[in-house]
Amino acid sequence: MTDPLNTVPLLDARGLRFTRDDDPVFGPLDLHVEAGEALLVQGGNGAGKTTLLRVLAGLLRADDGRIALDGHPATAARRARSIAYLGHLPALKQDLGTLENLRLLCGLQGRRPRQMPGNALAVVGLAGHEDSLVRQLSAGQKKRLSLARMWLSPAPVWLLDEPYANLDLEGITLVDRMVSAHLRSGGGALITTHGAYAAPPVRHRTFTLAPAAEAVA
């Protein structure tokens, strides 16, 4: 459970604004994610959901605003320790096996205590595919491997961009279970969605993103 004495959000963004070619994409907006909760970011195509996550992850630079992680400025080093990002494209080496990919990523990013790459493959339903090359996997299997990477990450903040895409009903249930476990351990998650799927069964708030509109969550 969240410590009631600790009121500092895991992720806090204030006055965040982003433009592309002088055209406003979103903002200024305020949002935060506390330990033990999920923030569901909804909005239609072009609302800027993916762009928002990329800004929070440090892959794009905001025009205005500030981002804090656990009460500290979101420097590149702090983002690397605090944020795990799941985008539309799998961040995987196509010519390596599934287990090799996870071992490589653990070497670069660390891993959660008592969690091992082989166990993570079993968690996401890829047991028996340890030696399968990523380029031989289906889209759904690649998504599951990306979820295994998230499961191994020690980062407290998960940024999940349309995590249900390319998954069947069993995979959707898997995402919900993983998010629930992450939140129970004190983590937080920001999840983009078109609203086509039910919210994960966790404590959550909904944030509707509209282009260049002020919003607070």
Image: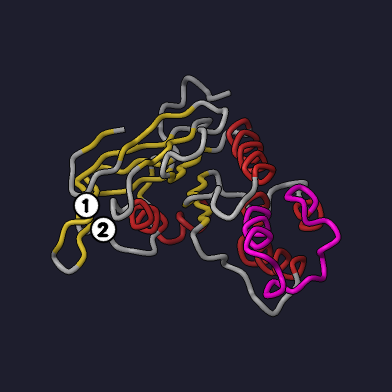
Whether 176 is among the magenta residues is: no
Residue with the most extreme right position: 128
Residue with the most extreme top position: 4
Residue with the most extreme bottom position: 95
Quarter placement of the C terminus:
top left
Q: Amino acid at mark 2?
A: Ala
* Residue wearing tag 2: 62
* Residue wearing tag 1: 17
Q: Position of residue 31 (x, y in %)?
A: 32, 38
Q: Marks 1 and 2, how far apart in space?
A: 6 Å
Q: Is residue 204 above or below residue 131?
A: above
Residue with the most extreme left position: 22
Residue at the image point whose x is 33% and y is 64% from the top: 60
Residue at the image point whose x is 46% and y is 21% from the top: 5
Residue at the image point whose x is 49% and y is 31% from the top: 37
Q: Is residue 72 left or right of residue 135?
A: left
Residue at the image point whose x is 23% and y is 51% from the top: 26
Q: Which mark is residue 33?
A: none
Q: Decide which of tag 1 and tag 2 comes sooner along the chain.
A: 1
Q: Position of residue 89 (x, y in %)?
A: 52, 65
Q: Is residue 147 above or below residue 183?
A: below
Whether 131 is among the magenta residues is: yes
Bin the neighbour count of mark 2 within 10 Å (Cα to Cα): few under 14, some 14-19, many 20 and up: many
**Highlighted range, magenta:** 122-148
The kind of secondary structure element at disc 1 is strand
The answer to which of 194 and 10 lies nearer the viewer is: 194
The answer to which of 46 and 155 lies nearer the viewer is: 46
Q: Position of residue 171 (x, y in %)?
A: 66, 46
Q: Are marks 1 and 2 in contact (CB under 8 Å)?
A: yes
Q: Amino acid at mark 1?
A: Arg
